[in-house]
Amino acid sequence: MSVKASDVCAFTKRRLEFLIKTSNESGRKAALANLRRGIGHKPGELPELWGEFLSQMPEEMYGFSGPSQAENAVYTALTLFALHQQGHELPGDPMYREGVNLGTAAARLIIGETDAESAFDRVRRRFNMTATASDTEEFTQHLRGLVQLMRAKGIPLDYAGLAGDIFLYQNAELRPEIRLRWGQELYREYDKLTHNRKDENNEKSE
């Protein structure tokens, strides 16, 4: 049975919802701390993380000569979520929000900035470095910076969807398609935000 991006999304969503909804507060804190320690490491390097991303994983997602693309995708999404969640209490303030894709969340970093155009230029440069990464390791390194900015502003991200994107991104033939979609998301949200700002300014001047 071949693994699909939708399978990776669905499994990651289950792991995220478990972390968010569990009543075991001490267990949740320990899991998130372990996942944060996993950033910069490859799946499997830290045994204390195995259960956080491998528990109940469908066997077809397993790698047999190193981490599989599915394991890489799930691991990257969960470790970045743990970083993003730091400083935000669960279950009341989750930084996982279904439907808030990568481009949309990045564009929302301009919210509250006085000079939206200048702020967007800074975001776009960082976003472009992330989107043009040649492998998962480089992608994670650049995305970490974006996530830290999102964390500071309390902007959530769809980490289940991100896992699916990362799964596909590891296929070089699919990268142009994924990059285009990220770019479309970025500019669609930016145009919407700046259009709304212009409308507000027009109303104030009337």
Image (cartoon, helix red, strand yellow):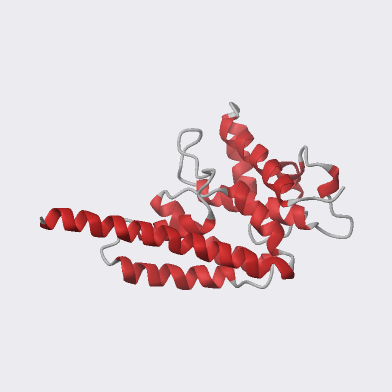
Residue 204 appears in which quarter of the rendering?
bottom left
Residue sitting nearer the eye, 30 or 55: 55
User: How far across and how far down the image is residue 76, in percent?
Assistant: 66, 55
Looking at the image, the residue that sits furthest to the top is 23
Residue 18 appears in which quarter of the rendering?
top right
User: How far across and how far down the image is residue 142, in percent?
Assistant: 56, 67
Write the residue at 89% across / 55% down: 64
Q: Is residue 57 left or right of residue 162?
A: right
Image quarter (top left, top right, bottom left or bottom right) of the C terminus: bottom left
Residue sitting nearer the eye, 63 or 179: 179
- Residue 99 seen in the figure: yes
User: How far across and how far down the image is residue 128, in percent?
Assistant: 52, 72
- Residue 48 seen in the figure: no
Vertical arrangement, residue 102 with respect to residue 22, above or below: below
User: How far across and how far down the image is residue 145, in percent?
Assistant: 50, 63
Write the residue at 24% across / 56% down: 199
Write the residue at 72% across / 48% down: 8
Residue sitting nearer the eye, 92 or 5: 5
Q: How many marks?
A: 0
Q: Is residue 203 left or right of residue 113?
A: left
Vertical arrangement, residue 206 with respect to residue 180, above or below: above
Vertical arrangement, residue 94 with respect to residue 39, above or below: above
Vertical arrangement, residue 91 with respect to residue 144, above or below: above
Residue sitting nearer the eye, 26 or 126: 126
Write the residue at 78% across / 37% down: 56
Looking at the image, the residue that sits furthest to the left is 206
